[in-house]
Image (tube, rainbow, N blue to C red):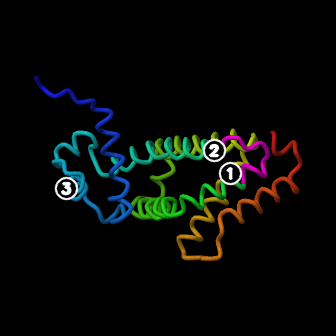
Amino acid sequence: MPKIVDHEQYRKELLGKCFDFFAHKGYGSITMRQISQGLGVSTGTLYHYFPSKQALFEQLVEETCQQDIAMALAELEGTETLQESMIALGRYLAKNEAYFIKWTYLWVDFCQHRDSQEIPGKNVFKRANKRCRQAASDVFNIQNPVVISFILSFIDGLLLRKLQGDEMIDFTEQCTFLGKMLTAYLPQEILKN
């Protein structure tokens, strides 16, 4: 009797293992052959599921975005105020610092190997950004897109500073401060609208 393979599940399993290969070597330095060897599958099998390294990376972004949002929402569950949510966010970032530093490095490396006009137009990145904005809006109970964009840019900036080796960055401290700033300086109608 032939083995029945759940192709979608197998594709997800392959993707789950690919992050570390990309993070270790960088997007620009790793080849599909090296990835297939690391996964213990033939290059043909890898190309069957992912027609190119870029397609593999884009699917990794899609899958990881969903997982990251689910993990962040679980971590921030039960917070009632913006300040509590920001403190929980800081703890979540600190707990997963190595992972987020790897992702940031990998993202920068990927962008470095693309035409600057090509990246913003990619639907996968638009969808990932839209999901992140929506999740942040929901968890922080802020509907104002400018404020949500500011919060996400702030987080990206913290990660980039960490990537640069800034040891003074304490995620919990920084997010706590951001929560205090937003609560104190922004009118409640801006936070809600």
Q: Indicate which label's residue lies in the foreground, 1 or 3.
A: 3
Q: How far across and down, in percent of the image, does residue 162 sit?
A: 57, 70
Q: Quadrant of the N terminus?
A: top left
In the shown orientation, is residue 129 left or right of residue 52?
right
- Circle 1/circle 2 CB separation < 8 Å: yes
In the shown orientation, is residue 23 left or right of residue 188?
left
Q: Which residue is mark 2?
A: 133
Q: How far across and down, in percent of the image, does residue 192 sit?
A: 81, 40
Q: Which residue is mark 1?
A: 149
Q: Reply above or below: 52 against 160.
A: above
Q: Reply above or below: 34 against 6.
A: below
Instruction: Please report whichever mark, 1 or 2, sits nearer to the chain's N-terminal start.
Output: 2
Instruction: Write down the quadrant of residue 189 in the picture.
Output: top right
Q: Which residue is mark 3?
A: 37
Q: Amino acid at mark 1?
A: Ser
Q: Amino acid at mark 2?
A: Arg
Task: Using a 10 Å C-alpha cutoff, classify the residue at mark 2 as few (fewer than 14 neighbours), some (14 to 19) or many (20 or more).
Answer: some
Q: Quadrant of the C terminus?
A: top right
Extent of the magenta region: 76-86
- Circle 1/circle 3 CB separation < 8 Å: no
